Amino acid sequence: MHNIRVRNNHTNDGQINHWHKGDHRAILKRIARHAMLDRGLLPDFSAEAITQLDTIDQPARARGDEAIDLRGLPWASIDNDDSRDLDQLTAAQMLDGGDVKVLVAVSDVDALVKEDSPLDRHAGHNTTSVYTPAVIFPMLPEKLSAGLTSLNPDEDRLAIVVEMIVGADGSVRSHDIYEAVVRNRAKLAYNSLAAWLDGTGPVPAPAATVSGLEENLRIQDETARKMKRRRHEHGALSLETVEASPLFEEDIIIDLDIKAKNRANDLIEDFMIAANSMTSRFLESKGLPSLRRVVRRPQRWDRIVELATEYGQSLPQSPDAVALEHFLRVAQAKDAVRFPDLSLSIIKLLGPGQYVAEFPGEQKNPDGHFSLAVRGYSHSTAPNRRFPDLVTQRLLKAAFLKAASPETPGPYSTSALEELATHCTRQEDAVKKVERRVGKSAAALLFESRIGQRFDSIVTGAGQKGTWVRLLHPPVEGKVVSGYLGLDVGQRLQVRLVHVDAEAGFIDFARV
């Protein structure tokens, strides 16, 4: 194991930081486990879950004619370069009159992970996979999520397919959802696929070997762009954020790797948004409840209006997604380099999303998902990674059974679904805090030798619990411990690094 000392400077305040001995990866793994436990999350699977896992030794198979055979379609997965838990495949087909049939196949995880089984109870406790810089805590064991329930290349898998007929204007004219058997023909990665779509790189090798796949991907890309354009015309927000993850050299953090969103990301995002929206509609049409994802009207619209004024634009006094989207487009055109900083401010001011239970005949949440400009929206496309998607999968199967036998009861009672919505929201918040906590520890390890340096920053949070800023470069977040009075979200200022504590995840700045 690599063993070094990272020397820290004396600060201008006379403070001396501790030396860290050992590799950063091991330090972060230990911190991550403690953070999981502190938030009431389970870093390990129970003995009962492992026992159940040992009984599962092959993928689920279709029984009789309950699933349509769609293995002949040019299905492909598009994900991160290092992703192993493949939740969805996509394919498309040109139709007469300019319409396009878009198909999204989602792994049938419920076929192997039954409700209230030990594996399901673990998944239902954490409710999502937890991604930290040094270690991932998967919602389901990798034997399943990266193996038997993953839509791996050249393997037959059961799936729930969302079929959408998309018009030339990007609208979804009709949709259907059903069970099918699919086969992944090519595992593709965002970066290489985007380079090919943009004309700056060769066709990805896996796509080049599959007959008709190149043309199919072009159809998917063009259709997704039309769908995106239509969504934004109706008020979906153009937000662009900066994602950074630690860059390791062996086991030592040497920098932050900044990930830029690209055309292939957009393709999958637009198809998944449409599939999640159609899932909600499908359940509603079948008289079944749904677990919906909601982002309500902005909590601090007044501050968003102030920010627009600072950019020379005006917004109405009441929340208006279409007007906000127009402001964002203008701001992006004027200053694309700093647009991610404005986007981050808007995201913080919009407030967090949450899960809610929606029942037939009710309309508890008429605003739906404010930033996506959709009324009904259910998470359904990542059941290997998110528990609400697995719940939605069970509701869909109840809808299939209900079509044949109307008296078939749903899998969840009213109170159970409401409790699930509250629980998933609460656990998601805990998971985000763990991920941020470990991310800050990673940044603190990187910054241990930079005490006293100055940085340009933007305020990302201001309240009773404190004021936080994110540096413009590198994109590290920390707390302002001196000179924070009067600061508000979206303001820019210069700060000086005064203290870091990797163990506690503290990065402290003073206003210059």
Image (spheres, rainbow, N blue to C red):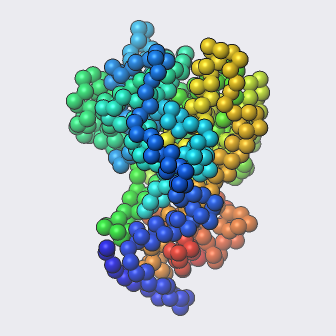
Give the quarter of the figure containing the N terminus.
Answer: bottom left
- From the top left corner, tell me how far across and down residue 405 is, in percent: 65, 15
Foreground pick, 430 / 215: 430
Relative to 87, is 44 above or below?
Answer: below
In the image, 7: left or right of 319?
A: left
Task: Answer whether residue 401 is visible to the viewer in this image.
Answer: yes
Q: Quadrant of the C terminus?
A: bottom right
| Residue depicted at x 66% and y 31% | 411
- The picture quadrant where one finds residue 321 is top right
Image quadrant where residue 398 sits:
top right
Answer whether residue 339 is visible to the viewer in this image. no
Q: Position of residue 85 (x, y in %)?
A: 42, 43
Q: Is residue 117 above or below residue 440?
A: above
Task: Name the residue rendered at 46%, 48% in the picture.
Answer: 141
Q: Is residue 456 above or below residue 264?
A: below
Is 88 or 469 nearer to us in this picture? 88
x and y percent of residue 229 in the render? Answer: 50, 29
* Towards the viewer: 124 or 459: 124
Q: Residue at x 64, y 77 (%)?
A: 482
Residue lying at the far top of the rendered structure: 96
Q: Position of residue 283 (x, y in %)?
A: 64, 24
Most distant residue in the bottom direction: 14
| Residue at x-position 59% and y-position 20% | 400
Left or right, 7 with reference to 507: left
